[in-house]
Amino acid sequence: APHSPLQATREDYEALSHIENHTLRVYGAMIRSLDRGIGRVLDALKKNGLEENTIVVFTSDNGGAGYLGLPNINKPYRGWKMTFFEGGVNVPFFIKWPAGIPKGMTYENPVMQLDIFATVAAATGTPLPADRKIDGVNLVPYVTGKIKGVPHDTLFWHDGGYQSIMAGAWKLQVVEQTQQKWLFNMKNDPTEQVNLAKTQLGKVEALQVLLAQYNQNEKRKP
């Protein structure tokens, strides 16, 4: 939670009487329940003496869905769940690990859930498999400043003929079936309002080359 169907207890719903919109109020009540559930987990860790050396990750698999009837759910970002606009892929990502990460730190460079595996493996002293390429990286040295630079030069999303690549400040989305393309400079336009695909043809071509290489590598995987 929160996820459809939107359902909440009467107690949580009535606690948010200041929210006039019924759907938004139910959604808010679900967030209230989620917050309480997270609190129970953290309290249990503390009670059992596990708080300092337990890694807690809070994140989401996608942005809010467009069918919920909440048009501003991903504001200020454009797009919804099942799209590769920021409203569909830019989600919360919090890591709490008092023994390994100082509290209150903010890391600005893009990361992905695929980094959780490598991060936890490193934290537990578990070697990564050597017989395959692991896409994720250990985030801790980047977050703490021991390693400079960025964890990923490129990030990819794909769902059939719908694909996206982010490389540096640039992000390209391509819909193969309709030949639609969106190109955004994420540094200047983080909410993806100005499509530069028709004016930055060289950048589109360069990113499509990287996409083709990615697709070829995916085909080679066992």
Image (cartoon, helix red, strand yellow):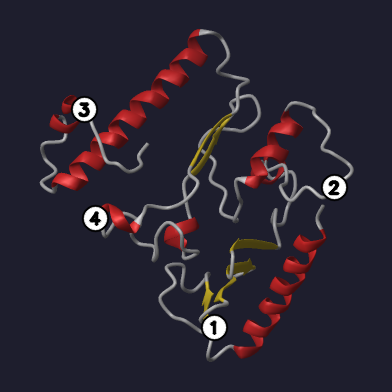
Up-down relation of residue 154 to residue 135 (above or below): below
Q: Are marks 1 and 3 in contact (CB under 8 Å)?
A: no
Up-down relation of residue 97 to residue 142 (above or below): above
The crowding category of the residue bearing disc 3, from other C-alpha atoms within 10 Å (few below 14, some 14 to 19, many at least 20), is: few
Q: Which mark is residue 132?
A: 2
Is label 1 or label 2 in front? 1
Q: Are marks 3 and 2 in contact (CB under 8 Å)?
A: no
The residue tagged 3 is 9
Q: Residue furthest right?
A: 131
Q: Quadrant of the N terminus?
A: top left
The residue tagged 1 is 179
The crowding category of the residue bearing disc 1, from other C-alpha atoms within 10 Å (few below 14, some 14 to 19, many at least 20), is: few
Give the alpha-carbon distance from disc 1 to disc 3, as whole Å.
Answer: 46 Å
Up-down relation of residue 8 to residue 90 (above or below): above
The residue closer to the viewer here, 102 or 74, is 74
Q: Which mark is residue 136?
A: none
Q: Identify residue type, mark 3.
A: Thr
What residue is drawn where x is 18% and y is 42%?
25
Where residue 12 sits: x, y (%)?
A: 20, 29
Give the alpha-carbon distance from disc 1 to disc 4, as whole Å.
Answer: 29 Å
Q: Secondary structure at mark 1?
A: loop
The residue tagged 4 is 69
Please give left or right for residue 135 compared with residue 85 in the image.
Answer: right
The residue closer to the viewer here, 21 or 151, is 21
Where residue 191 sits: x, y (%)?
A: 42, 68
Q: Compare marks 1 and 4 and give the one earlier in the sequence.
A: 4
